[in-house]
Image: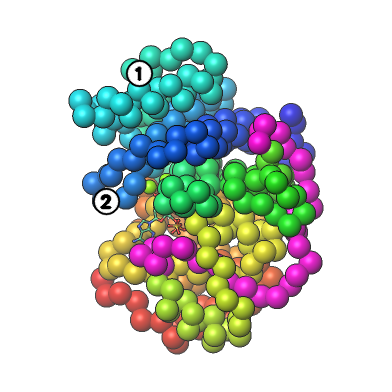
Amino acid sequence: MTTPLHDQAIQHAIEAVILAADACRRVQQRRITPQTLEKRDKSPVTVADFAAQALVCHHLAENASVTAVVGEESADALRSEDEAATRAAVTEEVSESLGIECSEENVLGWIDRGSAAIEPGKGTYWTLDPIDGTKGFLRREQYAVALGLIEDGRVVLGVLACPNLEMPDAPGTGTLLAARRGQGVIRYSLAEDGSLDAHDLRATDDTTPRFCESVESAHSDQDQAAAIAQRIGITAPPYRIDSQAKYASLAAGLASVYLRMPTRPGYREKIWDHAAGSIVVEEAGGTVTDILGKPLDFSLGRELTANRGIAASVDFDHASIINAVTSVATLPSE
Ligand SMILES: Nc1ncnc2c1ncn2[C@@H]1O[C@H](COP(=O)(O)OS(=O)(=O)O)[C@@H](OP(=O)(O)O)[C@H]1O
Ligand SMILES: [Mg+2]
Ligand SMILES: [Mg+2]
Ligand SMILES: [Mg+2]
């Protein structure tokens, strides 16, 4: 498979993300109650999150010229005695995906390749969310495998696979978007067998403005978003979907505004939650800032420490969104 945006990095990123998305689909279909751990921050992580991170890191290490990865997960929790069953399950899934018998130690090592030491703002590294929207994955709804490439603090490439995001013009398949800075974005349908078909970026002719937001009210203040939507004249009900599938929906014309209103003082967005999604929207001609209109600053390490929340739009007056935020919203005090 070669892509029209062809360059080696994007090719390797697409291959890695498809490998991971296939493993996620398999785990979701086969493991009726996916084994779930709770991380220190009380968020869930499944066999599929670990397997997907191992697969992407392994694929990039074997094939890409840039191999440093800043990923969401680490193998620490899996190394504990209590987690032998999860460790074995992750190893089984990775072995099945690669078609080889892998050792537990190798698989844990691949997951930990996602803990690269980076100098913020300098050099080139990937950022990976092996499953974005783990709660959506557990509900069998939307989730994404998100891989971005950061060069000197700027996102230059992004691949976003949304295995359950069916577009109106591609029923029965998921969606994959691949963007390269300055070269646009291509939308593919992602079939069950991992094959890709390119489509026009817009998936619908419906131009009714809609806004999308998190399913989880703990991740975005839905009342404030409703007040802002009203202020900017959006009357359609909110389109609530998990994960960076929101950015994919904007790029494909399913929604025009994405709002992520902070719910907790001190919470900072993670780079892997926005790198791939933001470049996909920007290369679709849209705008992505924080809720105060500041550009997202990916040069500060693992978190967007200079930003609060997210406002993204396509074919919409972005300044009017920021004005509405400033006049309607009250931010949690720091
Ligand atoms: N308090 C708070 N505020 C904002 N964001 C938070 C918060 N807590 C978690 N997270 C991150 O939300 C990621 C899930 O994205 P979404 O909220 O868009 O999807 S979902 O509705 O929760 O499924 C989720 O990503 P994953 O952990 O990859 O699922 C988290 O990184
Ligand atoms: Mg998580
Ligand atoms: Mg995430
Ligand atoms: Mg995740």
The residue under the point 35% across, 65% down is 218
Q: Which mark is residue 36?
A: none
The residue that label 1 is drawn on is 104
The residue under the point 43% across, 47% down is 138
Q: Quadrant of the N terminus?
A: top right
- Give the mark, 1 or 2, whose residue is nearer the N terminus: 2
Q: Is residue 293 above or below residue 201?
A: below
Q: Residues within 10 Å of mark 1 (few under 14, many from 20)?
A: many
The residue that label 2 is drawn on is 42
Q: Secondary structure at mark 1?
A: helix
Q: Quadrant of the C terminus?
A: bottom left
Q: Secondary structure at mark 2?
A: loop
Tell me which amino acid carries mark 2. Answer: Lys
| Residue, far front | 32
Q: How is the image coloured?
A: rainbow
Q: Is residue 30 magenta?
A: no
Q: Is residue 224 left or right of residue 321?
A: left
Where is residue 30 drawn, in percent x and y?
50, 33
Q: Is residue 128 above or below residue 331?
A: above
Q: Is residue 183 left or right of residue 299?
A: right
Q: Is residue 290 visible?
A: no
Where is residue 148 drawn, in percent x and y?
53, 43
